[in-house]
Image (cartoon, helix red, strand yellow):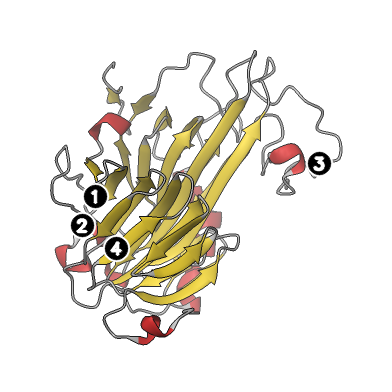
Amino acid sequence: MPANPAANSAAHPIVEVKPLGFPWATIDPFLFCVYHDDAYPRGNAQMGPDASLAGRNIGQDFARKDGWNMYHGRTVPGFPAHPHRGFETVTIVRKGLIDHSDSLGATARFGQGDVQWLTAGKGVVHSEMFPLLDAQNPNPLELFQIWLNLPAAGKMSEPHFTMFWSQDIPRLDTKDAEGRSTEVAVIAGRMQNTQGAPLAPPPDSWASQAQADVAIWTIRMAPGARWTLPAATGEGTRRQLYFFKGQSAALGGQTVNVDSAIELRAGVDAEIVNGGEEAEFLMLQGRPIGEPVVQYGPFVMNTQAEIAQTMADYQRTQFGGWAFGDDAPVHGREPARFARHPGGREERPAAG
């Protein structure tokens, strides 16, 4: 909760401060946010960890033994084939690589700041594996996965696969009066003075609606840096700031420690002063959809009847089926990033 009397002012940017949990708590229109930070060792010949897996609950390993997890992977860490319906996944890979495969026929290898935005819509099956390509050195992996809800009108939309390569993401690089830098990556939404054109979300996304005021930004601040997070322009917008790296920061004059989820008043500028070592934040913002949410595992609909129908549809159709030789495909030892879209169109990030 707010820690000083200033927080009670209607003009103060902070609404509430909570400790980060796992997964991170979200507010409508977001459903889920998880941060993976795995210190994987060097890779073996199968692109898995060159380390003993003894003592791990293989297929369900979330214990963070030795600083890393296998998750649902058995040889390569990651998440073998699983279904989704009724929402979108936004995956931001800061370190390491993800090998993606799905029932639309798309495959990809992405990382190093790339973002994948997948509209599950009426149903998709995908796998997300973490190949460890370096056989000589550690293979750190760091990523966010964010679930963005779809309104009732879009829950049965056509699935859509989108890649945003790191070099194409708009960025703000600014310095305060003392020359201390703040860097912002604008994955969704808009910000003045960024380098690069705003990215276009998938066509049926809540983020594609201008009045939804959806924004997804990552923020990195040098020690001692001072920067003002600009107020949102949308009416009814809500905003959550996740302080996940650093020591402490002051927001509107109130000190907040790292590992905090901070709900902000979206319509108010929020000055951030980094009080310690380099600090990093993730910001999620949007106007609430304001509809009932009924979730059953990887399915998010509006009613229990729709969940029952979803389960029946998946049992009958497998959301298009699975065309790969196993449920956890990886894409070879070549480290180059690529995306192969449904229908066969291929793209690669430009060199440099």
Left or right for 170, reference 46: left
Left or right for 92, reference 161: right
| Residue name at image x 77 percent, y 25 percent | 51
Of helix, strand and loop, which one carries label 3?
loop
Mark toward the start of the polypeptide (3 vs 4): 3
The foreground one among 84 and 165 is 165
Q: Position of residue 33 (x, y in %)?
A: 48, 57
Type of the residue with mark 1 = Pro
Q: Are marks 1 and 2 in contact (CB under 8 Å)?
A: yes
Q: CA distance from mark 3 to mark 4?
A: 44 Å
Name the image quarter holding residue 215. Answer: bottom left
Q: Position of residue 327 (x, y in %)?
A: 60, 36
Task: Look at discs 3 and 4 and give the one toward the viewer.
Answer: 4
Mark toward the start of the polypeptide (1 vs 2): 1
Q: CA distance from mark 3 to mark 1?
A: 38 Å
Disc 2: which residue: 208
Of helix, strand and loop, which one carries label 4?
strand
The foreground one among 78 and 7 is 7
Disc 4: which residue: 271
Disc 1: which residue: 201
Name the image quarter holding residue 301. Answer: bottom left
| Residue name at image x 60 percent, y 60 percent | 22
Left or right for 62, reference 301: right
- With respect to residue 32, does 73 lie above or below? above
Of helix, strand and loop, which one carries label 1?
loop
Disc 3: which residue: 56
Can you see residue 336? yes
Type of the residue with mark 3 = Arg
